[in-house]
Amino acid sequence: MEMEMEEKEMSPTKLEYYDAMLKLESSATVLSFFLNEDGREALVLDSTIFHPQGGGQPADKGYITDSLSIFVVEDVRLKDKIVYHYGHFQSGRFEKGAQVLLFVDEDKRRLHSRLHSAGHLLDICVRNVGWNHLEPSKGYHFADGPYVEYKGAVPQNELQIKQKELEIEASNLISKGGKISVSIVSYDLASQLCRATLPDYIPKDSNPRIVQIGEYPGCPCGGTHVKDIEEISSLKVSQIRTRKGLTKVYYNVG
């Protein structure tokens, strides 16, 4: 009950990665620390650069320290606008109100960003090879088998041909390069950047976060991305499945 009261009193966590995706170190204030129902230790801060699991993207890992104590971050989740850092203390303990330093694991963040960015690149390739009727419904960008799922079916006899075309198109786009920009804009401007009506889950009185690759249409996204398409290195389509009006395109990055 005490923790529930604290949650209601806490302000939403400031998401620093929202504006600074390449930032891997920051400082914050400890708001709460408790033992979760599943036995995991949880830490809540006033701000964070750790990306929580969501939107098909894995959670960041790393550690948080005040120079005397070290908290190893093993998982990060977002609930009701509050970010929970789950893990364990390698040494010491934090006091409420303590000033701490946050360090994100650079290798894992880079991998997650490349996988997530590759999913957006795949959306562009899908349209460039003529599958304009497919609309992205969700993505799963974990390293063990990333894919993008699309609403819409495709003929079975097209799959092998389009798989090769997608890889060629991705290779061409990666070789050309292109900046990936993120902006938080008005709903009307977001619609213009995406060159389409925004999904129903985005309120019309909100300021969506839009990710755009080069000059291609943008899309609403809360994840982290690489700075330039060329950082993806390569994209290989491992499999395409179409069933019950849905098409899944599985891929790997080099």
Image: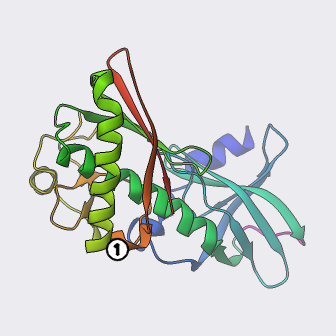
Q: Give the residue displayed 36% in from the left and 73% down from the top.
A: 230
| Residue 162 lies in quadrant | top left
In the image, 156: left or right of 103?
Answer: left
Q: Give the range drawn in magenta.
A: 92-96
Q: Give the residue displayed 86% in from the left and 65% down from the top.
A: 89
Residue 135's spot in the image, x, y percent?
A: 25, 34
Q: Is residue 95 above or below residue 207?
A: below
Q: Give the residue displayed 18% in from the left and 49% down from the top.
A: 128
Q: Name the residue under label 1.
A: 228
- In this rendering, does residue 190 appear at all? yes
Residue 225's spot in the image, x, y percent?
A: 41, 65
View extreme (top): residue: 244
In the rendered image, the quadrant that contains the N terminus is top right
Residue 18's spot in the image, x, y percent?
A: 41, 65
Q: Nearer the viewer, residue 46 or 177?
A: 177
Helix, strand or loop at label 1? It is: loop
Task: Give the overall secondary structure of the magenta segment.
Answer: loop
Q: Nearer the viewer, residue 55 or 214?
A: 214
In the image, 160: left or right of 199?
Answer: right
In the image, 58: left or right of 229?
Answer: right
Q: Give the residue displayed 47% in from the left and 63% down from the top.
A: 114
Would you call the spot at circle 1 few (<14 residues within 10 Å), some (14-19), or many (20 or more)? some
Under mark 1, the amino acid is Asp
Q: Is residue 200 above or below residue 41?
A: above
Q: How many labels does the image show?
A: 1
